[in-house]
Image (cartoon, rainbow, N blue to C red):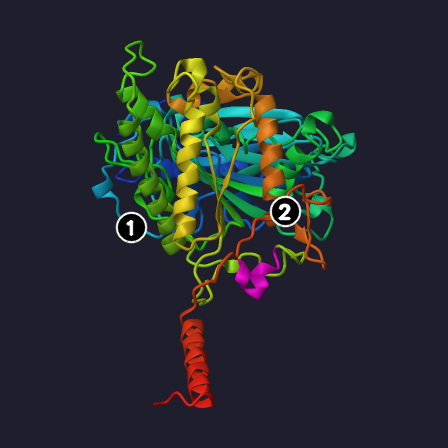
Amino acid sequence: MEARLVYLAILSALVLLCSVHYFAVPVPPLFTVSGIDTWVILKHLLRKLMEKDNIFIPASHPHLHYVGRWMPTANQLRRDAAFRGSYVEMVVANTTGLSVSLNNLNSASKQQQHPARLDARDLHHSVLPSVNARASDPVSFVVSIEGHHNTYWVEAAGLVVPIVQNLDPQKTYRVRLTHMGGPNGTNGDLEFEGVWLENARAASPTSSNETSPTARLLAFGDEDGPRRRRRNVVEIATSEASLSFINPLLPATSPTDPDDGGGGVTNWFTELDAVVVDTTGTGLLPTPESRLSVRDSFFRAGPPGTKAGARSWNFKLYHPSVLLLQLGLEDFDAFFSDTGIGTGERSPVTQHALAKFTNEFVDAYVKLVQGIRANAYPFNSNSDSEVASSSSVELLDDEDPDDVSYIYNSAPSTLTIFLLTPFSAAAAHRHHVLVAKKLTLHRVISSAVAQVVAAVQAEGDKSTFWIDTTGWLDAETDFDDDVDDDYEESSNQFQKSPSSSSMLNKAGMSKVTTLLADHLCPYVGVSTAHGSALGLGGGACPFDPYDDYLGDVFLPQDVEFSRSVLKHKIELIKQKFDLWR
């Protein structure tokens, strides 16, 4: 009798579990048993149920390839991401189905319906998030499966989220899961625990209960051969909402396809790791309401309003080959909105007011660049012989690619930083954001960004440059007021902001990735023995690298040596011409 009662209790829990977390049915927030968190019990029971026909791949598995600001929990059993565009890639084999294991609960069972707003003074430092067994708010993410020609937009809540069934176990699939924030355009924390791979059944009718080789992950890059060059990391801090979509979709074209821009799109997706730091909604200058700025996002593990946003980011976890800063749209849009431009009450902006605001913007931008060089990336790791070989020698996966230790170097940071004007500024006139008859928002921001580069270079920073994006995009054909068909399920995922008013469509995104890949080619390609740079596809780079070392790099010991040599020369001259008197 007792055994039957125990069986019924377990069965009831499993039924509740499946209805609540597998099908996202809400439950009361106070559902606990004897003070023990029911969430943990249900997770344990579901795992036992799933293990019969599935293989669990934990978030700490070495064959999972994380790109973006992913934070491990203290017990290493989970990876958390809060910035839109953060993704994890894997190569699956011998499986017929894929499900994702999360620690995100249905919003109906959470008392807090919206992310909490954090004041800048409340932000505190923590290296690793605590191991919180309770669930986080629901999230949205995109799962793209190369070779399956399907992309899935998921608003996830629950322990196990089914993604795809009926995969061919004879094939290998490259899967990319990209975090897209919370539901309804909010920010959110993706708490990733791993994936479930369904074992493939044997095809023989006489052995229906037997299984084929166990579902598994391949080492990332094995599908391309045993040797591969380690990917270069391109970090993009941007207020451009469109660029949150730069990572989800794996290329559907081949490098020879005319729509691929000569292979630029494919090279971007297959040869680079793009880390997106989404600053949508915050500007370089803090607003009176929130007192938050881009600095409160860039130096954090997540955007303000998320749990990750309360933790400082550990910049030793990866080091980019190139950093792109695409900021300013939020600031200038707020400035011109306050003056009435675009509202129908057209009060002209005086040159004095615009110049004053531009100076404040330039000053804030310069301080951000200097702060990044001093605190985030204090020196160029490529100066070290082992790390520098990422641009000149083909690294293997077994050559300690995760070595993130800093090596002492008294030289300042020479990380290449490119500043760009936000692309949406080119389409601002479609929404009546015109500064003057011949002065567009794009020209105003471009002029300010050029001043920033001139200012930092005048102070000795010779590795910060401006990429002029004028003429890259056509405001009439490369933007959509609504996201195009590829993103139609996510068209309402962003709160209204200047950058989300006009989103890059497929043609615009293709132009952006191709042109960016061309400009970044000398920094992320492979150097030859003659010193020239080869592109990601093996051809010559269309642009030469900027001269990173104009002027002298300040090294205190070199200065002292130079002074000693000069002093000795002066003494020799005095002695030769008898000038001691």
- Residue 429 placement (x, y as % from top left): 44, 16
| Disc assigned to residue 424 | none
Q: Is 406 above or below relative to 376?
A: below
On screen, residue 287 versus residue 409, left or right, reads: left
Q: Give the residue displayed 40% in from the left and 53% down from the top.
A: 373
Residue named by callout 2: 544
Determine the image quadrant of residue 150: top right
The N terminus sits in image quarter: top left
On screen, residue 210 versus residue 427, left or right, reads: right
Compare residues 465 and 492 and report the one nearer the observer.
465
Task: Report the amino acid beneath label 1.
Answer: His
Q: Nearer the viewer, mark 1 or mark 2?
A: 2
Q: Give the residue displayed 63% in from the left and 31% down from the top.
A: 145
Q: Is 553 above or below relative to 143?
A: below
Instruction: Report the span colored magenta.
Output: 382-390
Q: Secondary structure at mark 1?
A: loop
Q: Is 207 above or below relative to 412?
A: above
Residue named by callout 1: 125
Q: Residues within 10 Å of mark 2 (few under 14, many from 20)?
A: some
Q: Secondary structure at mark 2?
A: loop
The C terminus sits in image quarter: bottom left
- Residue 301 placement (x, y as % from top left): 38, 44
Q: Residues within 10 Å of mark 1 (few under 14, many from 20)?
A: few
- Residue 573 placement (x, y as % from top left): 45, 84
Q: Give the residue displayed 43% in from the left and 50% down from the top.
A: 457
Q: Is 170 above or below relative to 482?
A: below
Q: Residue 323, can we see it?
A: yes
